[in-house]
Amino acid sequence: MHETALMAEVLKIVQQSALENNLPKVTKIKLAVGKLSMALPKALIFAFQVLKKETVCEEAELEIESKEIVLQCLDCTREFRPQDYHFSCPFCTSSQVKIIQGRELHIISFEGEENELGSNCGSTLVKSQ
Ligand SMILES: [Zn+2]
């Protein structure tokens, strides 16, 4: 399953980072999941519940931040959010657009037991299509 592989990758990165930061226990993981990432939040949560067992993330909770699709017009360079998957520019009607947000799936941050303020590991890119 697609989401299982993605979540395994996320956990690998978090575990590695927790080790480097001397965190014996991870309490929370925050993920950004784009609406075009092809990963279903429900499936990600399910995979997380299964994969976190017997890892430093065993008691961690997963928070998913859904990212809206944002496009940029290549002709007039304006940014816009497509309505109903209508991917042409609302300003100049060009269909030459690029996706600047919505395909990402990355770790926003995670928190460990020894750092209540959160250990921000940056925006580690896990997958980008
Ligand atoms: Zn345009």
Image (cartoon, grey):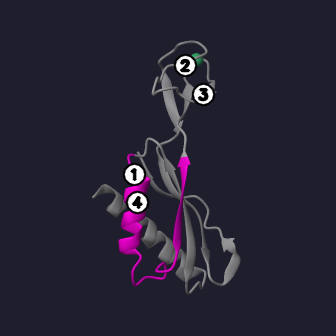
Q: Which mark is residue 77?
A: none
Q: CA distance from mark 3 to mark 1?
A: 24 Å
Q: Nearer the viewer, residue 31 or 94?
A: 31
- Provide the residue designation for mark 1: 40
Determine whether the residue tagged by mark 4 lies in a helix, strand or loop: helix
Discs 2, 3 touching: Cβ within 8 Å: yes
Discs 4, 1 touching: Cβ within 8 Å: yes
Q: Nearer the viewer, mark 1 or mark 2?
A: 1
Determine whether the residue tagged by mark 1 lies in a helix, strand or loop: loop
| Residue 65 located within the stretch drawn in magenta | yes
Three-letter residue code for mark 4: Leu
Determine whether the residue tagged by mark 2 lies in a helix, strand or loop: loop
Q: Quadrant of ligand 1?
A: top right
Q: Earlier in the sequence, mark 2 or mark 4?
A: 4
Question: On the rendered image, what quadrant is the C terminus found in?
Answer: top left
Q: Which mark is residue 89?
A: 2
Residue reaching furthest to the right: 117
Q: CA distance from mark 2 to mark 4?
A: 32 Å
Q: Earlier in the sequence, mark 4 or mark 3?
A: 4
Q: CA distance from mark 4 to mark 3?
A: 28 Å
Q: Residues within 10 Å of mark 1 (few under 14, many from 20)?
A: some
Q: Taking 31 as reference, is 49 above or below it? A: below
Three-letter residue code for mark 1: Leu
Q: Residues within 10 Å of mark 4 (few under 14, many from 20)?
A: many
Residue at 57 percent of width and 28 percent of height? 72
In magenta, the rendered stretch is 38-66
- Provide the residue designation for mark 3: 80
